[in-house]
Image (tube, rainbow, N blue to C red):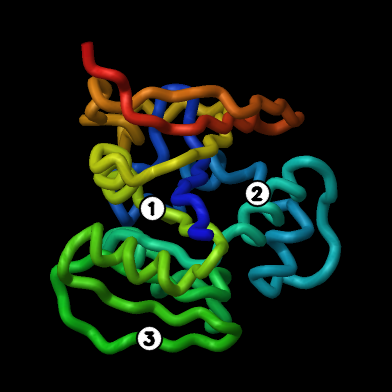
Amino acid sequence: MAGQVFFSVSMSLDGFVAPASLEDLMGPQWLELQQWVFPQRFFRENLGFGEGGEEGRDNDILQETFARTGASVMGKRMFDAGEPAWPEDAPFHTPVFVVTHESRDPWVRPGGTTFHFVNDGIHSALGRAREAAGDRDVRIAGGGATILEYVNAGLVDEFSIALAPVLFGSGVRLFEGVDAGRVALEVVRAESTPRVTHLTYSVRERERS
């Protein structure tokens, strides 16, 4: 049985998931948005930062998200930002399919991560990711524009947002340009922790009148 297609992101209270400029992607605003992640035990161990760290619901959610993911899809902007920042043992440990207009041979990293570069569209990337994932889920890793393409194409089954008590004011707004006339949501769960509120929704096609 094929798994679900989902995304999971941190978002500011005013709806932004990243700064507009790649140069600011590791800047203070973005770090504040992601501050719930950095102390978690699973995050530290997965990126090779050493043992120790916090345990609790935030840590569990990171671990559950990783465990369900059999393959990931991401856009070229996210890959370009991550390529110089990820450690040699990249944190995905599964195949990753990068949606791009460029041709490039697969980039094999230690620990099970291989980046495949797909230049014939989002449907092709998702098809290859589904095949690689088997009965596990496919995560649309980002960035915001790539997530939106999949949402508007009706290809996302579920998503989770870690809503952080941060205001950006500008940047990449997650649902800017969403086709709201075709997308309907149902609440799966809402959980608050001391740092963020985790919101999970299932996605279905909105009924046309």
Element type where label 1 sits in the image: strand
Q: Position of residue 62 (x, y in %)?
A: 67, 52
Q: Nearer the viewer, mark 2 or mark 3?
A: 3
- Cα separation, mark 2 vs mark 3, equals 27 Å
Q: Residue at x 23, y 84 (%)?
A: 104
Task: State the mark number for residue 107.
Answer: 3
Q: How busy is the neighbourhood of tag 2: few (under 14 within 10 Å), some, or many (20 plus)?
A: many
Residue located at (62% from left, 58% from top): 68
Q: Are marks 1 and 3 in contact (CB under 8 Å)?
A: no
Residue in the image at 48% along x and 30% along y: 12
| Image location of residue 56, percent across then percent down | 83, 44
Instruction: Relative to 33, say whether 139 is above or below.
Output: below
- Reply above or below: 177 against 21: above
Q: Which residue is mark 1?
A: 142
> What is the secondary structure assignment of the residue under circle 2?
loop
194 left or right, relative to 73:
right
Question: Would residue 53 be found to the left or right of residue 124 on screen?
Answer: right
What is the residue that sits farthest to the front in this orientation? 1
Q: Earlier in the sequence, mark 1 or mark 2?
A: 2
The residue identified by callout 2 is 37
The alpha-carbon separation of the residues under discs 1 and 2 comes to 17 Å
Q: Quadrant of the C terminus?
A: top left
Provide residue 123's location: percent of width, then percent of height: 24, 59
Instruction: Left or right? Give the position of 189 relative to 74.
Output: right
Q: Secondary structure at mark 3?
A: strand
Amino acid type at circle 3 is Trp
Of residues 123 and 91, the one drawn nearer to the viewer in this rendering = 123
Q: Amino acid at mark 1?
A: Gly
